[in-house]
Structures are given as structure tokens and as C-alpha cells.
Image: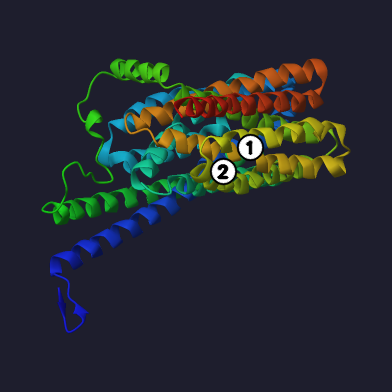
Amino acid sequence: MRQGGVRHFSSHTINKRVSEVRRERGIFAILLLLIASHGLVHGISAALPAVLPIIKSEFGLNYTEVGMISFSMGASLGIMGVFAGLLSDKSGDKLLEILGWSIFSSAVISIFAIFACNFLAVLLFFTLLGIFLSFYHPFSLSFIAMAFKERRGRAFGTHEIGANLGLAAAPALAGALAPSLGWRTFFAFLAVPAFLAAILILRTASRARMTERVGERERAGVRRAGERGVFDPPPTQRNCCCWWCEFKVFLARLREQRSLLRLYLAECTFGFVVGGASTFIPLYLVAKGFSVALAGALTGAFLAAGAVGKYLGGVLSDALGGKAISLGFLFATPLFFVVPLFPNALAVPVLILAGMTFPMSLSAIITGIGEQNTQRGLSFGFLMLAGFGFGSISRPILGIASDILGIHSIFFILALASLLGGLLNLSDISAKIHKNRTLQ
């Protein structure tokens, strides 16, 4: 309504807008907290490769046994990610609360590193740690997918920056502190920031639920039919059914949606490459004469470069869709291949460049999964199974190759896997182009 050239708003309209602004600020505050927590979760898992040279020397292990240690953590994280995804679909407004308690449990498990006194105990410790870390991704990614309806790719890409900051800091810190403090003490020390993150998430979860309930009351009289709040599950998820039925419905979707299946295959490739590279790069550098501290720092630089790639991948996924997946894999292929052919002075910058390019694929993959309107948590759970679970087989494979062919052979295998990932998604893009031409 206008009077004298001045627009007047009703108190109801003003209150609604204030509520929306407050809600948007709350969502972005939660995103910042999730970015930091993402860095912590990946930092805990990335600390393992940096201390593997120490564990290898302490217990007299070969490369295959070292690969099995990393495999135990990745496999447990991936397999339990599916069940965490199922749980996230049923959690409603308790997403952040359960996420906080999972990080709290991970902190408790980290302390038990001091009791890992033999090879089997080490395997058990990292298996349990992987189980509790598995809750993070399905819950956090489901929240982001629900909270950001627009520019979702950029939101996922920004969230992934936190992962790479943690991936960069943890190997560097582990390489610098673990040789003097001991790798067990270092993992016990990681419980401190984990406890802090858990407390902050639990407090934020309580406030977010209260804010959402206030907003629900304010919007109750004006909500349009079919409009949902941030924590409201899609209509197809409100009626609970058995977990096995959920699995069958999801597997049926995979059979019908080949593009969705290709996203999971791309994630399998990504997990194979990033898991194998982060595990064996510090071992390769130590074998080339670098100290454990310097090898950890360079591994951190390799993983930190991925922060740039993941953000670019998120922006490209909004603009190009699935093409961004192929670009990341194909750019990295020749870089991995030439690393062992160069002297150290050239190999290190090429390796860091490879660390920046192939993570471009991940943001595009996550954005594609986030576009699923049903069973979103289970979709992200299967993403963890593909990336961490299937991807973890790269550790024993690269370990066996290192024992038989030499540790330099890992880069040829990583280059081949990256090439296959790029070609797989190029074939998907070519099929879409052919389909569009046929329709025209």
C-alpha cells in the first residue's frame, strides 16, 4: 500500500521477512560450523597416512599390511555410511543432534589409540574410528541439500573446502608432531578439537530446532500447500517402512536411472584415487629420501590443493553439470603418470597440481546426488559406500603392487583409474548428446 509515495508494509509482512532473514543467517552459520567439522572429520582420517611410515617401522610391516590398515578404516566408514544414510532419512529435525553425538563418540574412540599395542589392535582401532566417522557425511550433506535450494553446487563446493583444509593440516601436523610425541598420543590429542566441535554442533542443533519451531508458528497461517521447512522430510519419506524395503526401493531406482548409477561409479573411481594417493604418497616420499615431517607437509599440500579444485568443481557443476566430472579426472591422468618419471624437484609441483585437478570431480558428483528428492540420506550413504567402501580396495591393491613392482608403480595405477573415470562420464555425456539429437 502506498501513501504519499511511501510504501507501507503490514506488520505481518515485516515479521515474515525478519523471520526469513533470521532463518537464512542461521543456515549460513550452520554451514560454517559444518565446514569446520568437515575439516576435522577428514583431518582425523587423513592423519592416518601421515603416521603410516611410523607404524610400518614400529611393527615391521610390509606395504600390503600397511594398505590393510588404511583399508580397515575406509571400508568400515563406507559400509556404515549406508546405515547412517538410512538413519538420516528418518531423523527429521534431529539431523544435527545425531551428527554432534557421532563426532563426540569419535572423540572418545580417538583416546583409545593409546591401547593399540599390536597390528590387530591397530586394525580394530581404525575400524571403530571409521564406524563413528561414517555418520558425518550422510547427515551433513542431507542438511545442505535441504537447506540450499539454489546454488546447491556452490554450497557443496564450499563445504568441501573444509575437508581439504583438514586434509592439508592433519598430515602436516602429524608429520611434525608424531615422530616426537608418538602416533598414539597424536590421535589422542585429536580428541580435544573433536569434543569441542561436538559441543558446538549440539548447542547449534538445539537452537536451530527452537528457531525452526518459532518460524513454523509464524508461517503456519501463510504456508502454501506443499511447502516444507528445512527439517521436513519429503512426503515419500514420512511413512516409515522397514529398512530392507528402503534398500529395495533404492536399488530399483538405480536400475532405472543409469545417470545415477554412473555418479556412483564415478565416486568409486574418485574414492579409489584419493584413498590410494593419500595413503601411499607419504610412503613414496619417505622411500625417495624425504623425512617423515616433510613427507607429511607435502602430502598436506597435495590435499590442500584440492580445496581449490573442489570449489571450482562446484561452480562448474552449476554451469556444466556432469561434464565437470570428466574434466577433473582427465586433467589429472597425465599428471599422475609423469610423477615417478621426474626428479623430486619437478615431481612435487606436478603432484600438487594433480591434487588440485581431480577433486574437481567430487563437487559435481555430490551435486548430482543432492538433486535426488527422495531417500536423500540413503543416497548419500551409498555415496559413502562407493567412495570410502569401494574406494578402500585401492589400499591393498597399491600395497601389493608396491611390494611386487616397487612403490613408484602406484602412480601408473592411479593414472589408469583416473582415465577410466573420465572416459566413463564422457560416454554418459555422449549418450545424452545423441539422445538430444534424436529427439530433435
Residue 142 in the image, given as x and y percentages of width and height: 37, 38
Q: Is residue 100 visible?
A: no
Residue 181 in the image, given as x and y percentages of width and height: 67, 43
Q: Which mark is residue 313?
A: 2
Give, as a three-letter code, the residue at label 2: Gly
**Name of the residue lying farthest toward the left:** 221
Give, as a three-letter code, the residue at label 1: Gly
Residue shown at the point (78%, 45%) measured from the top left: 349
Residue shown at the point (37%, 32%) measured from the top left: 372
157 in relation to 116, above or below = below
Q: Is residue 91 visible?
A: yes
Left or right: residue 231 versus residue 10 is right
Left or right: residue 211 versus residue 116 is left
Residue 408 in the image, given as x and y percentages of width and height: 81, 26
Callout 2: SS = helix
Left or right: residue 226 versus residue 330 is left
Q: Which residue is mark 1?
A: 328
Instruction: Name the foreground residue: 144 vs 118.
Output: 144
Residue 206 in the image, given as x and y percentages of width and height: 28, 50
